[in-house]
Amino acid sequence: MRPILKKRQINKSTLTLLQGDITNETTDAIVNAANSSLMGGGGVDGAIHRAGGGAILEECKDIRAKQGNLPTGKAVITTGGNLKAKYVIHTVGPIWHGGNQGEAELLKSAYLESLKMAVANNCSSITFPSISTGVYGYPKEKAAPIALETVIDFLKTDVRIKEVRFVLFDSQTFAAYNQALLILEERDDF
Ligand code: ADP
C-alpha cells in the first residue's frame, strides 16, 4: 500500500506530510519530542532512542551535565547514532494545561528553535513528529495549524532548508495536519 502523502512547494522548499514512523526517515535531521530531562521516555522519544542506540542517550547525558534540564520551547542536537538521519534535534514541547499557560507560544518556539538548530548545523532537510500531541495532551487540531504555520513562515524567508517533512504516526494525526494545511492554503497570505 502506498503511504498517505501530501507535498507542497513553499518558496524554494518542499513541505511534505506523511503517515509513518519517524525513525525510518533519511532527512539530515529528525526531531525528537523529548522531555526536559533528556533522559528518554515513551512515545516518539522512546522509539528514537531504541532505534538510534545508546550513543544518543550518552550525548544527551553530556548535554544535561553541561547545561541542566532543557527548558520547554528550546532545542539541542546530538548525532543520529544508528539512525539513517545524521542528527537528532531534541526539543521539549509544552504540556497542555487548557491553553492559557502560553502553550501556543511554547509550541511555536519548539518548532522554530529546532529549525534554527538544523540551519546552524548545515542540515538541508528535517523531519518533525507532532510535538506535544501525545502524552503531553495538546489537542491535535490546535497543534497542527501552529506547527504548519511556523514551518511555512520560516520557509518563506529562509531558503537554507530545502525539505521539511512531518511524519505523523496515526491516521487521526495525519488527518488533523492535512485539514490544517487545507485551511492555511485558503488564506490570502499563503
Ligand atoms: P509528547 O510528549 O510531546 O506529547 P509523544 O511521543 O507522546 O510526545 O507524542 C507525540 C506524537 O508522536 C504523537 O502523535 C505520537 O503518536 C507520535 N509518535 C509516537 N511514536 C512515533 C514514531 N515512531 N514516529 C512518529 N511519531 C510517533
Image (tube, rainbow, N blue to C red):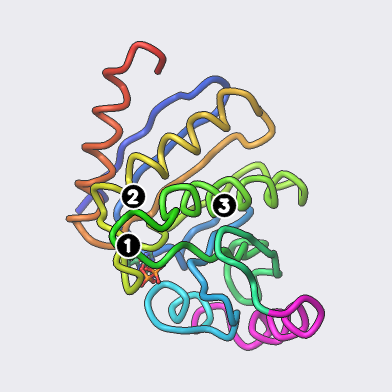
CA separation in Å, label 3 and label 1: 22 Å
Q: Earlier in the sequence, mark 3 or mark 2?
A: 3
Dot in front, 3 or 2: 2
Indicate whether 149 appears above or below 35. Answer: above
Please give the name of the residue rendered at 72% of the width and 44% of the height, measured from the top-left corner: 119
| Ligand 1: quadrant of the figure | bottom left
Ligand 1 contact, mark 1 (Cβ < 8 Å):
yes
Q: Quadrant of the N terminus?
A: bottom left
Camera-side residue: 170 or 5? 170
Residue 143's mark? 2
Amino acid type for the residue under numbered disc 2? Ala
Look at 32% across and 54% down and name the residue there. 99
Q: Residues within 10 Å of mark 1 (few under 14, many from 20)?
A: many
Q: Secondary structure at mark 1?
A: loop
Label 2 and label 1: CA atoms lie apart by 7 Å
Task: Locate residue 140: give its quadrant.
Answer: bottom left
Q: Which image quarter is the C terminus in?
A: top left
39 over 149 or under it: above or below? below
Instruction: Indicate if the residue with disc 2 has its beta carbon within 8 Å of ligand 1.
Output: no
Q: Position of residue 117 (x, y in %)?
A: 70, 52
Q: Amino acid at mark 3?
A: Thr
Per the image, the residue denoted by label 3 is 27
Mark drawn on residue 133 = 1
Q: Is mark 3 within 8 Å of ligand 1?
A: no
Residue 74 image offset from top left, x and y in percent: 62, 60
Q: CA distance from mark 3 to mark 2?
A: 23 Å
Which is more N-terminal, label 1 or label 3?
3
Q: Which residues are magenta?
A: 50-68
